[in-house]
Image (cartoon, grey):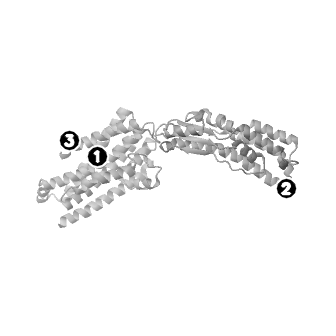
Amino acid sequence: MVILRDRKSLIITLCMPAVLTTILGFAFQNMMMVGNSIGRANIAVVSMGSREDDIERIKEFLDSTAMEGRIDEGQKAGLLDVLDELDFESILYEEVLDNPQVGEFVHYEKMDLEKARELMDKGELASVVVIPRGFTYNSFMNLVMPFRNPIRIEIIKHPDHSIKAEAVAGMIKGFTDALSAGIIAKNVLLEASIENNVGDMAMNEIESVVREMYHIGVKEIKLDKVTEEGKRTVSSFQYFAVGMAVMFILYVAADGAQYAIDEVHNGTYSRLIMASAGRFRFFVSRFAATTLFAIMQLIVLVNYSRLVFKTDWGSPAGVAVLSLFLAVAVGGLSVLLSSINLRLRNSKASTIFQAVVIQFSALVGGSFFPVSGIPVMQKLSRLTINGTAMQGYLKLMMGYGLEQLTGTLFTLTAITLVFFAAGVSVAAAVKER
């Protein structure tokens, strides 16, 4: 009855999660990594060299005295034919960046480095891909000659678009890996040929090796979007609905502890003791009331998100069981905070919990942003009520069943038992006083 009469608490615990879910869901719907899309990345491709200049360098090398007697005119003509066919920069543009699948995620534009840096400073580019000077020359030498010229394609990433920049880096890595595969194949061929004294024959085969590398390697670079069968992605509204639910449910525990000290100040607690109701019944009632109110809060937010945003929380049975375990854990936390408040004869414990502990738990638990990419915070989140429950709800939203929540339910049970044990210990000290 006291809880239902406390309008301020009702507004905070029932309405505020819904309001924040709405605000954050709309604000981050195009930015959430766990959402349906990370948006299209705008990138610039900067070529520092000239293919024409590189071709002239290659021709000069093949006509140089260093190659005199090593290859005949027919072999030289064959290598130049391969060079005409393998325009490595065009392969990057046409076979990778112009790929329709890649185009769904990346829009590129060729420009000079100065303009690219200017646009990046304005935040208009996610990354800049810089193709080094001598790219065609060094690629040719690595593929058809017994040389290993270093090639470094630089990717400049904008710090505000780290996810998109990493995706672009992965695509470029696929291209360079395909080139590396051809270089490795060439090196293996030459080394094996030299060991068997058939080096001249190997030079005749290099042309075909390079051609095959192009047709089955570089040209086959594709981007596949794959979602695990039977599993779903989580939208920003789903994520923040869970995040706000598990965060604000902690306020229920703090409010329950506040009501306990209020009953001390208004004499209710003393009358209960004098009436031989017992401290155990007092704490059990505090636990029961907090648990029931926590369940009510979850029911309101789950149904609000379902009706307003069509949020799919997953298996109804799984949501019900997980919510029950979470509410019981919050009830246990309320018992501990109530015991501490009674021990101190003031509400400092619940006040500090609301001002500091809840904010810290929400941060490490992932209520404000996903912590899956931060190992330390990911480990800490598993030690908190909200972090553990949040992972369980997200699993249900992704399509997992109740049987996959065993670890989550076990952790919540362990946390509840720890809180109860600590609450009983503190309550015993109160009795001794």
Residue 60 image offset from top left, x and y in percent:
80, 43
Residue 215 image offset from top left, x and y in percent:
73, 38
Q: CA distance from mark 1 to mark 2?
A: 78 Å
The answer to whether mark 2 and mark 3 are in CB contact below 8 A is no
The answer to which of marks 2 and 3 sits earlier in the sequence is 3
213 left or right of 315 in image: right
The answer to which of marks 3 and 1 sits earlier in the sequence is 3
State the mark number for residue 294: 1
Q: Secondary structure at mark 2?
A: loop
Q: To which residue does mark 2 refer?
A: 196
Residue depicted at 70% across the width and 47% down the height? 181
State the mark number for residue 7: 3
Specify the amino acid type for callout 1.
Answer: Ala
The answer to which of marks 1 and 2 sits earlier in the sequence is 2
Other residues around mark 1 within 10 Å, as few (<14) / some (14–19) / many (≥20): many
Q: Nearer the viewer, mark 2 or mark 3?
A: 2
In the picture, which quadrant includes the N terminus?
top left
Specify the amino acid type for callout 3.
Answer: Arg
Specify the amino acid type for callout 2.
Answer: Asn
